[in-house]
Amino acid sequence: MVNIKAFTLVSAVERELLMGDKERVNIECVECCGRNLYVGTSDGFIYHFLLEEKALPTGTTTFTATKQLHRHLGFKKPVSELRAASALDRLLVLCDSCISLVGMHSLEPVPSGARIKGASTFALNENPVGGDPFCVEVCILSVKRRTIQVFLVYEDRVQIVKEVSTPEQPLAVAVDGHFLCLALSTQYIILNYSTGLSQDLFPYCSEEKRPIVKRIGRQEFLLAGPGGLGMFATVAGISQRAPVHWSENVIGAAVCFPYVLALDSEFITVHSMLDQQQKQTLPFKEGHILQDFEGRVIVATSKGVYILVPLPLEKQIQDLLASRRVEEALVLAKGARRNIPKEKFQVMYKRVLQQAGFIQFAQLQFLEAKELFRSGQLDVRELISLHPFLLPTSSSFTRCHPPLHEYADLNQLTQGDQEKMAKCKRFLMSYLNEVRSTEVANGYKEDIDTALLKLYAEADHDSLLDLLVTENFCLLTDSAAWLEKHRKYFALGLLYHYNNQDATAVQMWVNIVNGDVQDATRADLYEYVVDFLSTCADQQLVWAHADWVLQRSQEVGVQVFTKRPLDKQQKNSFNPDDVISCLQKYPTALVRYLEHLVVDRSEQKAEYHTHLAVLYLEEVLQQRAAPSHSDTTATETQTKLRRLLQKSDLYRVHFLMERIRGAGLPVERAILHGKLGEHEQALRVLVHELGDPAAAEDYCLWGSEGRGAACRQHLFHTLLTMYLQAGPAAPELAVAAVDLLNHHAGEFDAAQVLQLLPGSWSVQLLHPFLTGAMRGSIHAGRTAQVALGLARSENLLYTADKMKLKGRAIRLSDQKLCQLCQHPFTEPVFVRYPNGGLVHPHCAASRHQAPNSPSPGTRT
Amino acid sequence: MRRPDAKVVLLGGASVGKTSLLRRYTERRFSDSVSTVGGAFYLKPWRALHLSLWDTAGREQFHGLGSMYCRGAAAVILTYDVMQPQSLVELEDRFLGLTDSASKDCLFIIAGNKVDLTEQGGEGDGHGPRGPRQVSREDAVALYKKILRYRMVDEKAAPAAEQMCFETSAKTGHNVDLLFETVFDMVVPMVLRQKAEEPVETVDITSQKPPKRTRSGCCT
């Protein structure tokens, strides 16, 4: 057990002052009340001293005692006990089994001669039950066997109030309120002298050792227990503190919060009541008295009196902290709550918590440190400032004075151990990240976030980017310099962006992509920049970098124009004409952009549609011209072109027709004819030039889309006619005609078709067509008949209803009674219910309001 | 220091592992502890309450203190060593009498410690002497029922014996949390009930001293 210094022992009364050279005279008892110190001796003298306390600049205290008086009691017996009752200005003196009263300052006996006889020992009640301030309650153990007496002692008289007998001879007593704590010959008990009830505490052996009974506070006593234990017991007979462990031969005990002091023949030991640990041992030989008087602890040998001066609690706490005894320091600090004013305590306690936190931190006990920093509400900058260069240069922070710890910086703390340093930094990262969004950060968010950024950058930590893309308070200049130093150029760009310097940010990223600076944070940085620009509201900036992005990749680069978020105000969008003129140099990008305008944004401007169609067409023609071109399949561009030509109604048809003529693009030409309404021409191109019946059929379907069955029939008939006109010269067209009829039977007017068909065609050949046509015709006829029947029956029902309503006359006369109120009708107005019941209009109205009344329907 | 709301006391013979159990629970570790002198005390916040945990000294020398430690206890954990049959016998002979001063609806829990030393205690680290267990769980259950008779509690009114007998190992931590937390959870409603019943904090020492009971002959 490492000692702490809780008390210092100083001399109060030298032996020369007391008995001079009288060898055989001993100190028997001591009393201290305020500055008055009384000493009783074995030869019947009482000495009165005045104590003067002097604090030395070294922090220690000395006492000088000045002798005031001494008086002999008149007996050759020792003075065994002294107690001052300052309210009465009396000193109670026990000598020769008799308690007498003397004046506190004169030491003269009271004139009345009041005394208590037959006392072996006595105790004052420090928590008196009577309200009278001009008397003290005294409990004496009678020299008569097994009796305790309670007295009220006044200025010059005594009065017995109670006498209680005990089961065994009492040896020592302490009093609190009605409760006596007694050491009997074999056990300690608590006795309530007003009720006479007692409570056993625990057994001990009075033959082996002298009992100690000491009141240590409200309703609590300290007792010498078995095995050298100092036991705590309350008046309820329970123990609320763990015992302290003394030596076996303890003579006396005293309390000076939070310490319990004990005296044995060799030492004074000091235990803490807070954690029951032994805190200090002072060698002290031949001591035989240890007592506390209102917080002052006095110890005496038979020849001299000494005072144990407690060190200020704060000094003790600091000593503990200095020796890294964090737990004990905290316990002591917490225990000091009751000795220190509240505001002062809170300041002190917080500081202790913070100091303790730094001690744990220095030992890399980060969990404990964190908890201490948190509960001590540490200014995080104290911690940040341990790490060199982390605080922004602009920070106004200066460390707390006196300092919370002894370390200049992390280097000193870790003694240059890189591994330890890294651990500290990791802790700081997690700690700052935790506190930055709490109220701890209020007032210096900039310092915290900047420090965090620096740590992340230095450690190459992923959270650096998270920090920069979310709300943060990183200071720009400081952070920028740091990021540059650590080559975090991408992050630097993010920082600029966060600080609304998008131009600088983009330039930074462009430099990385161009390889001017090295930062591999993002492999897809080019795409990132494009994406960034496509959402960037600053058009100037987009224009500035448009060429750069397009030069790298037209397909991707054009996204800065095409991938812009849609907004209603059109604030964010570019003028398409500007974009198109910019994109002239980048054909692929231009096509993409026009597609974006026409397809995605459904721009209605004819120019764009025509432009796009022309670009498609040019590409198709180019592809055709290429030697590798294979004729059969339509290329992707061609499909796109066809789709555009079919879907859009906005391009300039004639203009395109000019361009397409002679280019060998029959399908496209047919579509253009179709757009102009020249269906016959279109079909002719498809049938005669292209020779593709399937394409012709598709054309019929497309051309009539959304224009009704009549149009479609017309197109199909046109096509059929075209097939048949060719005659036997073109047998493949006859086959196409048959297929057309058989596949699209429903699209034709069968009667017309039959007239067109050559007589030579067999019924077998047209079987599917004829069956289909027949079916359709019969179905239509039958459906019409069903509809007719239904309409007729509906008509019949209405006629029947009308007949019913007209059918019967209603007779209203004086004799007719209203079915609800049973009164006759006086006016021609009435209400008739569907079941024929007649009622007054007002009765009908009220019946609707009161639905419980009987309905006329059930009456009739 | 906050005044505890209820007291839980560990009783049992010397070296059965009371201190180790408490240390395992409060400090999450096991270390060879020296013989406890007098007693030790922990304050445990549990739910809204503060419970005081008393570790007592098992040595004969401090036996006289037990009664005071048990006074007003809400729960008593009687601890024995599963490898020492004598330690279970002692619970009945020496320690049961100390609980006379406990609160009248005091809970009794029996904990057989050091199961890591038995051959069945599979969680041990394999070191140290092992042997067949000396005390069976049934013996502990039987003791629990004896206690109920001693306290004159109807067996049906008290918690079931199976629920109140634990086998623990402070060394491995086996069942230690379960033991303490089961006890705490049972103590909390008791304390709340008592608080509701007697809102004024008075101490009536008359009720604390029950008349000496004579043991019924059948229990010996």
Image: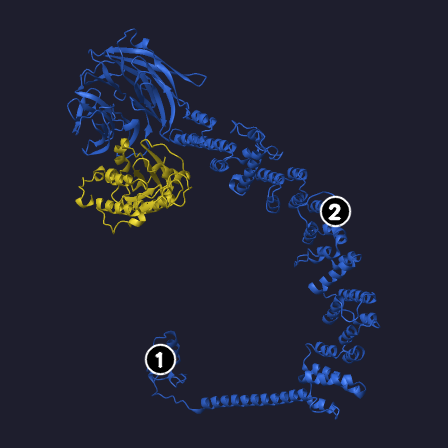
Residue A474 is tagged as none
Instruction: Count neighbours of disc 1 (C-alpha within 10 A) and say few if under 14, some if 14 to 19, many if 20 or more.
Output: some
Q: Can residue B2 be seen in this view?
A: no
Please report, as a chain letter, where disc 1 is located.
Answer: A
Q: Residue furthest left?
A: A144
User: Looking at the picture, which amino acid does disc 1 mark?
Assistant: Ser
Residue B77 or residue A9, whichever sits in front: B77
- Circle 1 is placed at which residue position? A855
User: Which chain's colour is blue?
Assistant: A
Q: How many labels does the image show?
A: 2
Q: Is residue A702 above or below residue A775?
A: above
Q: Can residue A670 be seen in this view?
A: yes
- Circle 2 is placed at which residue position? A514
Instruction: Count neighbours of disc 2 (C-alpha within 10 A) and say few if under 14, some if 14 to 19, many if 20 or more.
Output: few
Please report, as a chain letter, where disc 2 is located.
Answer: A
Residue A401 image offset from top left, x and y in percent: 52, 27
Residue A742 or residue B88, whichever sits in front: B88
User: Looking at the picture, which amino acid does disc 2 mark?
Assistant: Asn
Residue B163 image offset from top left, x and y in percent: 31, 49
- From the viewer's perspective, tell me whether residue A478 is left or right of residue A340: right
Q: Is mark 1 on a helix, strand or loop?
A: loop
Give the color of chain B as drawn: yellow
